[in-house]
Amino acid sequence: MRTLAIIALSLGLAGAHAATDPKLLLIEQKLGGFEDKDYAPAIEKTLVEFEARTGVNLRPGDLRRCGLKLSSEGGAGLATPKPLVRAIAAALIRRGFAQNAITLCDTKPESLRQAGFLPALSSQSQSFEGFPVIAWDTFASVWAKESQLRYENQVLPRPGSQNVAWGDARVSVLPKTLIDEVDFWINLPVLSDSKSLGVHGALAAASLGNMANAERFLDNPFNASKAAVEVCAIPKLAKRNVLTVLSLERYQVLGGPGFDASWCRSEKTLLSSANPVIIDFIGLQKINAGRAASGVETIHPEPPIFNAANAGEIRLGTCRPADITLVRLPAP
């Protein structure tokens, strides 16, 4: 396992070369603080840099819709920061999207409410500051009728779990919104450790955190890694996931992905890449650094998801620092 310092040095040396492949680019953007006024210019700088270096166009396509995948399972304590959501949504509006065409989404309505992205009552408008909000669980029984949205794995739910509405507990339901109904979507995870994957970040948010009936994988690390990688590699889902933006405003080094304030750390940094693997790999170093500083055992050996992410025909993105072009941007 490389130390954080070695990784930073290796990435820094690579930063002199312009990237053509979006998955070989990592942008580190410093924040002046965690308010709206801090996130807004930082996100605009990040997106301009990403578009210029990769040629990826973050503007409306044929569908004229896009998605922002939130992470809300940790409730208000450990969720995608609202100023980050506002900043990205505003940047996308400047690029031509209508406000009602930017969909905020996550799996469970309960966690979206706890995190403040949905109102307390289901009878109220299901929106956040004018942006529509969708919870996958709400539509899963309908979506399960479409074969392309069914992810089957032999792992059964935990004993005592409710039966799924579609009748087969070995089936999880993928998000139709992000597969069929948007030009692209941006992943906005939060970072923590986890029993199932080791690192609960970009890959987890794009896979287990992106489908109904995924809780069945959480107690089984082998099957969780397998399921996470397979879901992230589904062509229609992966093709539209153009970018991950991770804020380190609050991340958790122990006891995740459930929220535990005593193990939360903070850094004024955004990490952005089309490659979720490098985001999580850097996240692992930060988790281990936080653990070591607190005298807690680090995560070792390296979680198997990193090897699985680039095994066989699956290529989710390299986590070799020497392969990555790092662009460091100062706080605006």
Image (cartoon, grey):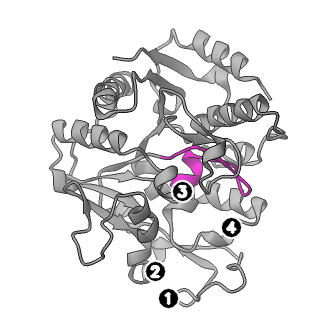
Is any atom of residue 211 visible in this view?
yes
Sequence-first tag of 4 and 3: 3
C-alpha separation, residue under disc 2 versus residue under disc 1? 9 Å
Please tell me whether mark 3 or mark 1 is closer to you in this view.
Answer: 3
Q: Which residue is mark 4?
A: 217
Residue shown at 77%/60% (left/top)?
222
Whether tag 2 and tag 1 are in contact, CB under 8 A, the answer is yes
SS of the residue under disc 4? helix
Q: Which residue is mark 3?
A: 74
Whether tag 1 and tag 4 are in contact, CB under 8 A, the answer is no
The one nearer the camera, 57 or 133, is: 133
Q: Which residue is mark 2?
A: 144
Please tell me whether mark 4 or mark 3 is closer to you in this view.
Answer: 3
Q: Residues within 10 Å of mark 2 (few under 14, many from 20)?
A: many
Please tell me whether mark 3 or mark 2 is closer to you in this view.
Answer: 3
The one nearer the camera, 2 or 52, is: 2
Q: Which residue is mark 1?
A: 165
Sequence-first tag of 4 and 2: 2
Sequence-first tag of 2 and 1: 2
C-alpha separation, residue under disc 4 versus residue under disc 3? 17 Å
Residue shown at 79%/41% (left/top)?
299
Whether tag 3 and tag 1 are in contact, CB under 8 A, the answer is no
C-alpha separation, residue under disc 3 versus residue under disc 1? 25 Å
